[in-house]
């Protein structure tokens, strides 16, 4: 964890203080400490075996089941103490501030779940045959609150961290997807199963429930590994493009970032945001099929060379069409050089004939092209690039996506691109990517 902003530190501090105050209030009268101790140990075990999600920024464990079992068996204060046992997990990696936040988040979430359980008529103690089905609704409410509070508090700290380093939320938040949220709710049901079995088999109940929980952990691990393989595949293709065309260094990452900003601004659901992130990273992968001498040529392109450049969207589709997880991203890669007025390429589509992903990519691609350094000019100021986007809105770009991008840009800012590493010292060199400045026929401010 890098240096956090003051607001992020205040947020973590507020969560920690709130958790401490609520837990201190109890009540501790009649608290069944045997449940707290045993379930606390179970939380420590599950946290020590937590599964790392993307880039180690998030992790997942099945500890919520033990916390919800403690809601039923030990009440709000006991559940909070069980949740706080996450601090003793033996997992390597978390920074001290991450541990403080995670501990406070789980303690607070468990305490709130316990309060909701009681408020909905739940009875604290061992369930028996007379507890069902009346206990189901209070437990469901507690489970919903625990998962919602957990995801909500985590989203808050990720958002504040994102606002500091300008990282799109989707690159941090695979753990906050709707799929994982629903999975957490599903696994929470094991908490009630654990509490119910306790009245029959005693302390063996958690051990019996551990078996399906560790199967669940295996499934989440497979999901995490799948995500890592996706990232590795996309990263390798991007690296190959950047090696071939030095002017694209960092360009794919920034187009991906800009596309995600637009997608989030217009309210795309999580899975589509993830898909458009991949589309932004791979939108220029077709350059692998363009001769290097064309991409790095100094001076003006011939008609034949420009025709070769115009084929790169179709070549890109040919390269990645068999990568199943790209799905809707394929249409964006194929059509990101189409224009609203129908004068783009490769198919000359117009208006809403152009896939939504492609219209989003076109805005982010052109903006990064204008605000990046070129061999014959420096990067244009952001304000000037915005003015150009608005100028060509409705002819080259979808006006709704231009407006969405500008709104997101004003709120989040834009990363400063690194200067390209030129293949020679010829500062007058013009690469193929520079042939799409304003005024060029049929290709106003696209970047090739």
Image (cartoon, grey):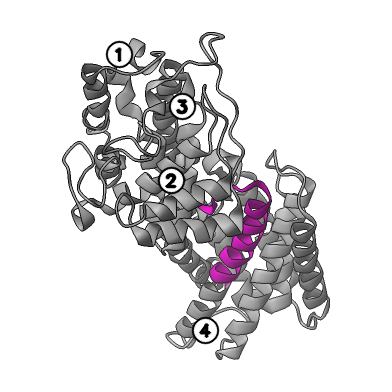
Whichever of labels 1 and 3 marks the residue nearer the N terminus, that label is: 3
- The residue labelled by disc 3 is 248
- The residue labelled by disc 4 is 138
- The residue labelled by disc 2 is 364
Q: Secondary structure at mark 1?
A: loop
Q: Residue at x 77, y 51 (%)?
A: 97
Numbered-mark total? 4
Quarter of image, res 237: top left
Per the rendered image, the range of residues in magenta is 146-172
Whichever of labels 3 and 4 marks the residue nearer the N terminus, that label is: 4
- The residue labelled by disc 1 is 291
Q: Is residue 212 above or below residue 333?
A: below
Q: Secondary structure at mark 4?
A: helix
**Picture quarter with the N terminus:** top right
Disc 3 + disc 4, Cβ < 8 Å = no
Residue 120: horizontal and vertical position, in percent?
55, 89
Question: How far apart in space, not on screen, are marks 3 and 4 (Cα)?
Answer: 55 Å
Q: Residue at x 48, y 62 (%)?
A: 184
Disc 1 or disc 4, which is closer to the eye?
1
Residue 285: horizontal and vertical position, in percent?
34, 28
Whichever of labels 1 and 2 marks the residue nearer the N terminus, that label is: 1
**Picture quarter with the C terminus:** top left
């Amino acid at each position: 964890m890098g240096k956090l902003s003051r607001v992020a530190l205040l947020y973590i501090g507020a969560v920690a203080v709130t958790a401490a105050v609520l837990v201190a209030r109890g009540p501790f009268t009649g608290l069944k400490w045997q449940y707290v101790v045993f379930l606390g140990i179970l939380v420590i075990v599950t946290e020590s075996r937590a599964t790392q999600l993307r880039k180690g920024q998030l992790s997942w464990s099945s500890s919520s089941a033990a916390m919800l079992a403690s809601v039923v068996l030990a009440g709000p204060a006991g559940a909070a103490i069980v949740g706080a046992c996450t601090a003793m997990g033996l997992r390597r990696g978390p920074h001290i501030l991450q541990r403080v936040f995670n501990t406070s988040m789980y303690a607070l979430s468990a305490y709130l779940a316990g309060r909701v359980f009681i408020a909905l008529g739940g009875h604290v103690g061992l369930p028996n045959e007379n507890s069902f089905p009346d206990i189901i609704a209070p437990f469901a409410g507690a489970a919903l609150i625990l998962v919602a509070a957990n995801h909500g508090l985590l989203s808050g700290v990720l958002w504040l961290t994102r606002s500091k380093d300008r990282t799109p939320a989707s690159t941090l938040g695979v753990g906050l997807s709707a799929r994982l949220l629903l999975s957490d709710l599903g696994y929470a049901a094991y908490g009630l199963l654990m509490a119910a079995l306790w009245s029959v088999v005693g302390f063996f109940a958690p051990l019996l429930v551990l078996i399906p929980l560790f199967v669940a952990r295996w499934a989440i691990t497979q999901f995490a590994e799948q995500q890592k393989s996706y990232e590795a595949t996309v990263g390798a293709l991007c690296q190959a493009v950047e090696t071939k065309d030095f002017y694209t260094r960092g360009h794919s990452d920034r187009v991906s970032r800009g596309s995600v900003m637009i997608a989030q601004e217009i309210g795309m659901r999580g899975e589509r945001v993830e898909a458009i992130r991949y589309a932004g990273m791979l939108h220029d992968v077709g350059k692998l099929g363009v001769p290097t001498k064309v991409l790095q040529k100094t001076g003006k392109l011939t008609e034949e060379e420009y025709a070769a450049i115009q084929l790169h969207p179709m070549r890109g589709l040919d390269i990645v069409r068999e990568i199943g997880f790209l799905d809707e991203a394929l249409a964006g890669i194929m059509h990101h050089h189409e224009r609203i007025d129908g004068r783009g390429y490769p198919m000359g589509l117009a208006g809403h004939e152009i896939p939504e992903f492609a219209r989003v990519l076109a805005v982010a691609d052109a903006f990064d092209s204008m605000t990046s350094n070129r061999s014959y000019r420096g990067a244009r100021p952001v304000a000037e690039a915005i003015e150009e986007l608005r100028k060509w809105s409705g002819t080259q770009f979808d006006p709704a996506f231009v407006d969405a991008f500008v709104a997101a840009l004003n709120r989040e800012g834009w990363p400063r691109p690194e200067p390209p590493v030129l293949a020679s010292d010829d500062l007058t060199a013009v690469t193929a990517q520079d042939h799409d400045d304003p005024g060029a026929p049929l290709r106003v401010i696209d970047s090739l």
